[in-house]
Amino acid sequence: MRKSTVFNLFVVAILGLVLPDRAFGQQKPLKDLLVGTWLQVSVDVVSTDGTRRALYGDNPKGIVIYTNDGYFSLMQARADLPKLASGRPATATIDEAKAVVAGSIAYFGKYSLDEGSKVLSADIQASTFANQVGDATEKRTITSLTDSELRFTRPGVVPGTTLDVLFKRAK
């Protein structure tokens, strides 16, 4: 073998050891990127004409956690939820209770991820909106997933709308 060929093979071998897999076009599996804790940035209802409405206001508070063993937990709320005058959920006024229900959601369960279609399916086991429990249509399409950002869409509750949800990785 020629010296230049041996040298070139040596350089390629060294680069293969020091450069991350992504330098050679290999990405982490989506599930590996998904696992972790994510903080809410936005959650918008998007109409077919492109109009956007912030579902939980301009500065929503929320978190979603995905575990290695297929569990998840999500909580989202408006930043301006009212404090209850009585200080006890059981004695909230009708208006207070309505504001809390309309301005927040929390649920947990198991998830599965189809790497090819980027569809995240949620098997919701408990929710503050009980209609979600056992609903086989609870699917999200991941539109962006990096080390620092998670964005997905799903059909909105109102026909002709889509929910566009953005999280950043917690640090």
Image: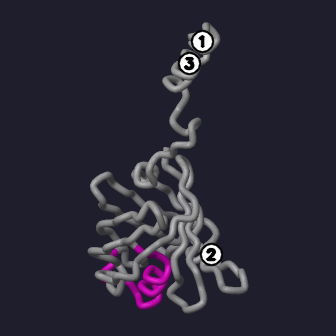
Q: Amino acid at mark 1?
A: Phe
Residue name at image x 55 percent, y 39 percent: 22
**Residue at mark 1 to residue at mark 3: CA–CA distance:** 5 Å
Residue 160 x, y percent position in the rendering: 60, 90
Is disc 1 in contact with disc 3, using a CB cutoff of under 8 Å? yes
Q: Label 2, label 1: how many angstroms apart (C-alpha)?
A: 58 Å
* Residue matched to label 1: 7
Identify the residue at image location x=68%, y=78%. 52
Tag 3: amino acid: Leu
Instruction: Report the span colored magenta.
Output: 88-105
Instruction: Give the number of the disc on residue 9.
Output: 3
According to the picture, the residue beneath numbered tag 2 turns out to be 54
Q: Position of residue 32 (x, y in %)?
A: 41, 49
| Residue at the spot 55% in from the left edge and 28% down from the top edge | 19
Q: Which of pointers 2 and 1 lies earlier in the amino acid sequence?
A: 1
Crowdedness of circle 3 by 10 Å Cα count: few (<14), some, many (20+)?
few
Q: Amino acid at mark 2?
A: Ala
Helix, strand or loop under label 2: strand
Query: Can the viewer see residue 79 in this picture?
Result: no
Rate crowding at label 2 as few (under 14), some (14 to 19) or many (20 or more) other CA atoms within 10 Å.
some
In three-dimensional space, the C-alpha distance between marks 3 and 2, rounded to whole angstroms, equals 55 Å
